[in-house]
Image (spheres, rainbow, N blue to C red):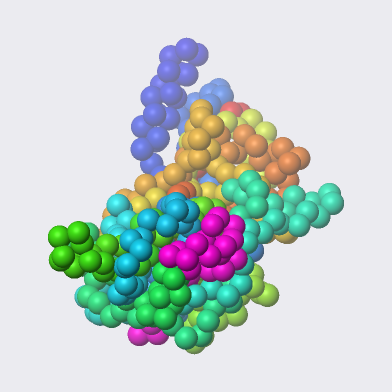
Amino acid sequence: MKQLTRLSYILFSFLGLLVLTFSSCNKEMGMSLGNPDENLSVTLVDSLSISTSTVQLEYLPTANTGVLLVGKTNQPVIGETIASTYFRLALTSFTNDIPENAEFESVDLVLTPHASKYYYGDTLQPQTFHVHEVTETIETKTIPTIPGIVNTPVYVTGATIFSDQEFGYDAIALGTLAFNPRVNSGDTIRIPLDYAFGEDLFEKIQSGDPAVLSNDNFQRYLKGLVVVPDVDNTAILGLNDTVYVNLNYTYPGSDGFTKTGKKTITTGSSAYQYNNIEYDRSGTAFEALDRDNRELKSSSTNGDIFLQAGAGVVAKLEFTSLRQFLNEPNMAINKIELEIETTGYNYGVFPNPNALMLFIANKYTGVPISFVRSPLSTSIQTATMVPGDAFGKKTKYTFNLIDYIKTINDAAYAETCLYLAASSPSLFGTTDMAVIAKDEFNQPKIKLNILYTKFK
């Protein structure tokens, strides 16, 4: 019997190299050694179905990410994505260090590229930024609680600002700049602002006006700025979240020559800097996906589903018969993997995300309540992109679900599903997206690969 068991184990190890794909074909196949007395076999089943949707999350925080996102993209499958960035300004000192006889010359907003040199879209085309004065107080928001219901996502820990929030701003721009982005060069973007705006601020500082004697006063006087893209932009750029407003002036030096100087105002608290992400899906299969209609079944979108960071779009996955399958008697799961194939590559103007993650969400409220962890760990599991190629090989992401299935019978997870999303922190600070590839049956190429042992 020991010899038989050892032989069965060798056969099982060899079969571990095989990958079993589940769909809705209701096909079953068993393998054994042919001995009527054996009590161990490897069984392959092809009988699990996957229900898929595209979901628009209700709350996705984009404050305090360390990156300003500004720009616009237009993609055939999902339409337009527009990123604007809002921020408060703050004085670094409240003493008047401007020379008494100085004269105001100009004011400009200085933006620098983020260390990641992030961009998404076509940067070979000229881009245009518009700077406007915010007319509403930029404030954080607390998600209202609902008794008896968990309605706060696992990634929201307090008051913050969400990607779909908007604050009013003056329709007339303080400044506009058209430029050719050179992302890898680290060039500074310097946007000249309205002379009268800068002169008024300069004079307040010179005269010691109460509006500039504290940042609370200052932020009541100047509620903030917003940088918005032009309608013809073709890329979204990532910028450093420390910005500078320079009040440039001249003054006569002690040597009789004219000197130049500047008074610099910088970014206020990062809690009040956030990226507003808008979208226009008109003319696409996802036109109906919005704040009022937050889920579209793949059957209504020609089999397409997608996910997008920043905009808060995730792919919903439900394995409708997985719990029943796992509760089959006399069975031990040895390996279970979730494999996702996407269109696109790791290069080009719209590359796939470097990594994806899985949230565990309440399938009725749509709220992510937890996340799939790495095996034998408490950390969030991420699936790193395995690039595709131009010869037909699809980009692939693979998750190990061996620990996740241990919770499948927990009461807390009885009414849950999985949300496939860009991994953190990209989820909150980029607009990366991915379209799930389709198979020959026009279904998303999502496979649940299971290897298990069947005991007789």
* Front residue of 55 and 185: 185
Q: Is residue 211 left or right of residue 93?
A: right
Residue 266 in percent (x, y) is at 41, 58
Answer with the quarter of the image where residue 126 lies: bottom left
* Front residue of 144 and 89: 89
Which residue: 60% across, 80% down?
288
Q: Is residue 57 visible?
A: no
Which residue: 39% across, 29% down?
13
Q: Is residue 37 above or below residue 151?
A: above
Residue 246 in percent (x, y) is at 34, 65
Which residue: 47% across, 19% down?
5
Residue 442 in percent (x, y) is at 47, 71
Q: Is residue 211 magenta?
A: yes
Quadrant of the drawing holding the C terminus:
top right
Q: Is residue 179 visible?
A: yes
Q: Is residue 60 magenta?
A: no
Tell me where the magenta segment starts and ends, as one range: 204-232
Residue 146 in percent (x, y) is at 81, 55
Q: Is residue 37 above or below residue 343?
A: above
Q: Is residue 136 left or right of residue 229?
A: right
